[in-house]
Amino acid sequence: MGIPTPTIPTFTDGQVVHAADLNALGSNLTNLYNYNNAGFTTQRPLVIAQATTTQSCANAAYTNVAFGQAVINTDNMWSASQASQLTIQHAGVYWIFGQIRCPQFASGGVAGNILINGTSYTNSKSTSIFGPGPSGFTGPTPQMGLIVNLAANATVFLSLYQSVGASMTLQTDFGGSYLGAAFLSPST
């Protein structure tokens, strides 16, 4: 199961090296490269996309959060042309995480959702639900995350459903809203 741990042969000065030894060296170097997942050891795929402006979310509706910048984007998973999604470039096991910064509200609730491969609530893989906070509370900040095996070109969205009785404007303070993906290991 998986790629074997590579071993690199050693040679002594003056030793005649045979083709089989050189072929084994080449094969083990290839295994070493694959074992380290195509060179990701120095810079694994990682993205954190952050909302930079407020965003209005309708009552009793799902709204995908749009992001204004990528704070980290080592693998081009976020693009301003598709501001509300991440696109996985390399298959693998990822830690997907997000936060939605809501204003204070007195009744109803909010639910943050991480959606994989679609924008319908049925694509939700992780959810965080909050009700109204105590008096003086600055607003809930649903955080969610999951570890998931994703194929190349998989899409990831952060969605908010709210039922506070009126439109809600997402905030940019206290960390704001963000969505991230961190490569952990090759696909299983």
Image (cartoon, rainbow, N blue to C red):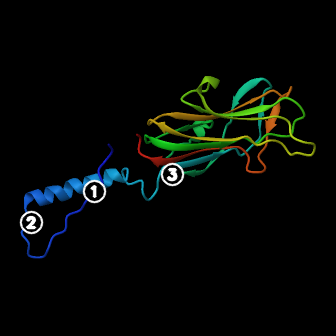
> Which residue reaches farthest front?
1
Q: Classify 10 Å Cα crowding around label 2: few (below 14), some (14-19), many (20 and above).
A: few
The CA span between labels 2 and 1 is 20 Å
Amino acid type at circle 1 is Pro
Q: Which residue is the site of mark 3?
A: 74
> Can you name the residue that lies furthest to the bottom here?
13
Q: Residues within 10 Å of mark 1 (few under 14, many from 20)?
A: some
- Residue under label 1: 6
Q: Are marks 3 and 2 in contact (CB under 8 Å)?
A: no
The three-letter code of the residue at mark 2 reads: Val
Residue 8 coordinates in the image, percent (x, y): 23, 62
As helix, strand or loop, the secondary structure at mark 2 comes to loop
Residue at image coords 90%, 34%: 106
Residue found at x 51% / y 45%: 76
CB-based contact (under 8 Å), mark 1 and mark 3: no
- Amino acid at the residue labelled 3: Thr
Q: Which residue is mark 2?
A: 17
- Kindly report which numbered mark, 2 or 1, lies closer to the viewer in this rendering: 1
Nearest to viewer (mark 1 / mark 3): 1
